[in-house]
Image: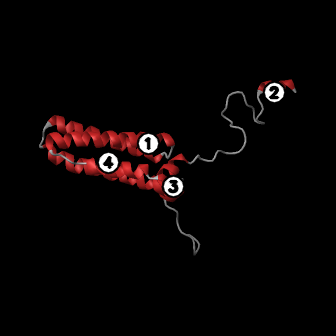
Amino acid sequence: MLPPGTRKQSARSKQAPGHPLIRLVTRLVVAQAVAAAAVGLPFSRRHLPTVLITLALVAALCLLVLVVRSGTRTAWLVALGFETVFFIFGLSRFVVARYVGGTLFALVIAGTLLHPAVARAYSVVRAQPAGPARDEVGLDETGETFGERAAG
């Protein structure tokens, strides 16, 4: 039993909180994957190549979600590049088949990624723990290399 005034922490609150804008972009990409599946699969009319392309796109979006959640500058660049390519692919599909599924979503996410506050959120350097890295080759428990310790 918990003492009065305390709340039980959920598994989500125990994780690293992350930046709210990074969580926003992550949710947008998840929504894009759901929308691409919900619109693309009925539009395919059981045409196997179209179904496979839609499933590949949804799988790529799921992988993009994992990349975007990391919050690194590289993740921002990968997401921006993917959304740009997805938008161009969507425009070509619109010209050929009058299909717009996901194209506008890609434009919204690319615009969100280009917003200066979101770009800054992805460029924030994570704090490194103070002191020497224990897993670095050549360092002992004091943070000196074996050569420094032997020299004096």
Place of residue 96 in the rendered image (x, y in percent of width and height, measured from the top left)? 15, 39
Res 84 quadrant in image:
top left
Label number found at residue 106: 4
Q: CA distance from mark 2 to mark 1?
A: 40 Å
Q: How far apart, in angstroms, are the residues tagged by discs 2 and 3?
A: 41 Å
For marks 2 and 3, give the one nearer the viewer. 3
Question: Nearest the camera: 112 or 49?
Answer: 112
- Quadrant (top left, top right, bottom left, bottom right) of the C terminus: top right
User: Which element carries disc 3, helix, strand or loop?
Assistant: loop
Sequence order check, earlier mark of 1 and 3:
3
Pointer 3: residues within 10 angstroms few (<14), some, or many (20+)?
some
* Of callouts 2 and 1, the N-terminal one: 1
Q: Residue at x 45, y 47 (%)?
A: 69
Tag 3: residue type? Answer: His
Instruction: Say which of marks 4 and 2 sits in front.
Output: 4
Reading the image, the residue beneath label 2 is: 148
**Residue 102 in the image: x percent, y percent?**
26, 48
Give how far apart the Cα atoms at labels 4 and 3 are: 21 Å
Type of amino acid at the residue the image marks with label 1: Val
Q: Amino acid at mark 4?
A: Ala
Residue 19, numbered circle: 3
- Can I make out residue 56 in this image? yes
Q: Earlier in the sequence, mark 4 or mark 3?
A: 3
Question: Is residue 101 rendered to the left or right of residue 116?
Answer: left
